[in-house]
Image (cartoon, grey):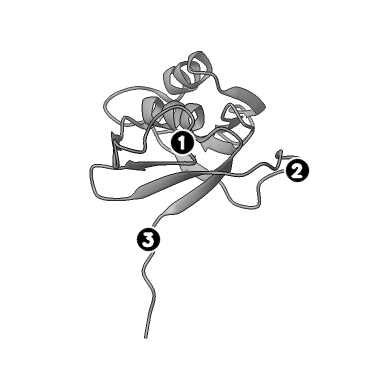
Amino acid sequence: MSLRLSHTTFDARDPYPVAEFWRELLGWEITEPESYRPGSEECYLISPDGYVLLFYYSPDVKTVKNRAHLDLRPSGGASRDEEIERALSLGATMVADLREEYTWAVMADPEGNEFCILNG
């Protein structure tokens, strides 16, 4: 017996703008356009190879560090620093700039969910 990963879920107080941040950052497609709209309680995105992120309504405010997070590497010729600047322009915040010490930056999406941008 075994299990397969279906998708990764992010709790969000407002799923649509958080999903839009990640859609712009990752360049992924909208999975279910009929529910992908402002005010929706869940918004799905799908990667070119079929991986799914779900942004699901939760009234709770994020208050502590994530126990799990996404680690991202630049692709398509962009550098780590270019992708960090692009993430900031989309609404991310810098949590910890560890580029000189460890070669990555810890960032947060508009609702505070952490992610790292690594060297390519």
Q: Amino acid at mark 1?
A: Ser
Q: Residue at x 54, y 19 (%)?
A: 91
How busy is the neighbourhood of tag 2: few (under 14 within 10 Å), some, or many (20 plus)? few
Q: Nearer the viewer, mark 1 or mark 2?
A: 1
Q: Residue at x 71, y 38 (%)?
A: 61
- The picture places residue 74, in percent across and down from the top left corner, at 37, 31
How busy is the neighbourhood of tag 3: few (under 14 within 10 Å), some, or many (20 plus)? few
Q: Earlier in the sequence, mark 1 or mark 2?
A: 1
Per the image, the residue denoted by label 2 is 64
Q: Amino acid at mark 3?
A: Ser
- Looking at the rendered image, the quarter that the N terminus falls into is bottom left
- The picture places residue 85, in percent across and down from the top left corner, at 49, 16
Q: Amino acid at mark 2?
A: Val
Q: Indicate which disc residue 40 carries.
A: 1
Q: Quadrant of residue 23?
A: top left
Q: Earlier in the sequence, mark 3 or mark 1?
A: 3
Q: Residue at x 43, y 17 (%)?
A: 82
Q: Is residue 38 left or right of residue 113?
A: left
Q: Indicate which disc residue 6 carries.
A: 3
Looking at this view, is 34 or 120 the one in front?
Answer: 34
- Is disc 1 placed on a helix, strand or loop? loop
Q: Quadrant of residue 48?
A: top left
* Contact between labelled residues 1 and 3, with CB atoms less than 8 Å apart: no
